[in-house]
Image (tube, rainbow, N blue to C red):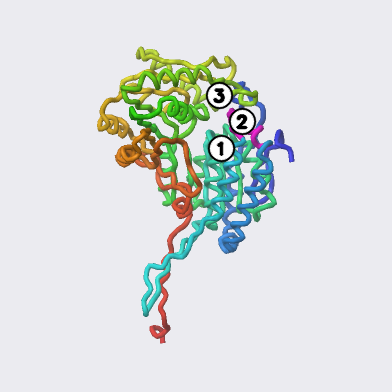
Amino acid sequence: MRFDSDYKMLIDGQLVSAGEELDVVNPATGKPFAACPRASKDDLENAVTAAQKAFKSWKKTPVDERRALLRKAAGLIAKNADALASLFTKEQGRPTELAKQEILGASYWLSSTADLDLPVDVTEETESRRIEVHHVPLGVVCGIVPWNFPVLLASWKIAPALLAGNTIVLKPSPFTPLCTLKIGELFQSLFPAGVFNVISGGDELGPWMTSHEGFAKISFTGSTATGKRVMESAAKDLKRVTLELGGNDAAIVLPDVDVDKVTEQLFAGAFGNTAQICVATKRLYVHEDIYDAVRDKMHALAKAAPVGDGSAQGNMFGPIQNKAQYERVLDLMEDAKKQGLTMLHGSDVPKEGYFIPLTIVDNPPENARVVQEEAFGPILPMMKFSSVDDVIARANDTEYGLAGAVWSADIDKAVEIADEMETGTVWINQNLQSTPMTPLAGHKQSGVGAENGIYGLREFTQPKSVYIPKSSDSVR
């Protein structure tokens, strides 16, 4: 199997092309390097029809068989991690070693999710009857995956959907379709035809999918603005939805921390994956007593961090993944300049490609766009605070509520602050942590539903209550 060419969709167990193709751009050069199929409405119809047909038998497949196939799928991804990582860097931009971590993470998620169980819940057990609640599959799942973590976030949808007994049609981002298409090829002979389908396409494909009456559920990861459109589309026939959306995550740093140790972790939590992480630190609040020290060390780390083509050895940070996002981040930086804000830039970046220097904005006002908007790029506003109550109010003053972090030597105090933060996840003295057993759930406009763990698995099921009499006297 070649990973550098011949990209096809997987529909009903067959690898298929499309009548049109889309260019795939290497963000390190800004130039196309490959092409993928651009699915038509007929391609989508074929995929949905195949998934509907396969659902009839897949839902009856013993759960242990479904577990075994997910574990085999995990093994196939791990076995091909090096080839997938090289391809990943070309389409997504992240340095290859870090790309491989994502590939192996997806493998881990598939195998770990396979260990989950959906037991029958008993809500009543008396002499006269027993009431059981079963968690039954929904049908065909529409999975829509973003470009920032295209393989890992695909696994977050594939694993629970299939384990629960659903079938799936998966759509990767048009910016990063290639690894997902190759994973489809790896899985071609593993799952029964129609159980797992992958289709690629342009901006029109997502709306076609979310409005298609053949889907029982939509699992979407992306921006809040697009998530609202997905929810509106799903409402027409009451499709179930899981939406993991945007965030403007705040980290609060108290004055009792070890600045040298904490700053390196803060830096990684803000700028990892060139800050293209939904749960990255996007607003950094530092107590005034240590603000200057943290700022100066953060700036020093930015100046020392090599930024460039992820396929070249030594580069720690790659480009912004696509031109549209690159231009959005540039617009935020230009606005900060016009407002006279102080910007501390990191190391030089290549002139070719979608590169932006790692940048710290020094103590901007709360009403600055760079504070209020989710950048999803390497521009980090750092703000001073003196009062804990004030900083909690500032951290919560946002339409988002995805994740947050508190840094302090006093764990009890940190937990008190965490309890006040209006987010689905709070880390204490750490960041960017997630596990297959722990839910990720956005508060406010950061999402609907949960992913991962038993909470995420149940999102792919419908409770079904069965009332069972202990005797047949009532029908005699």
Q: Which mark is residue 91?
A: 2
Viewer-closest of 295 and 179: 295
Vertical placement of 46 versus 346: above or below?
A: below
Q: Give the x, y percent position of residue 147.
A: 54, 34
Q: Disc 3 residue type?
A: Pro
Query: What span is colored magenta in the figure?
Result: 83-99
* Residue 412 at least partly seen: yes
Q: Residue at x 59, y 25 (%)?
A: 27
Element class at badge 2: helix
Label 1 packing within 10 angstroms: few (<14), some (14-19), many (20+): many
| Residue 249 placement: quadrant | top left
Vertical placement of 132 versus 151: above or below?
A: below
Residue identified by numbered label 3: 319
Q: Disc 1 residue type?
A: Pro
User: Seen in the image, is 80 located left or right of residue 149?
Assistant: right
Q: Disc 2 residue type?
A: Glu
Q: Give the x, y percent position of residue 65.
A: 61, 60
The overriding secondary structure of the stretch rendered in magenta is helix
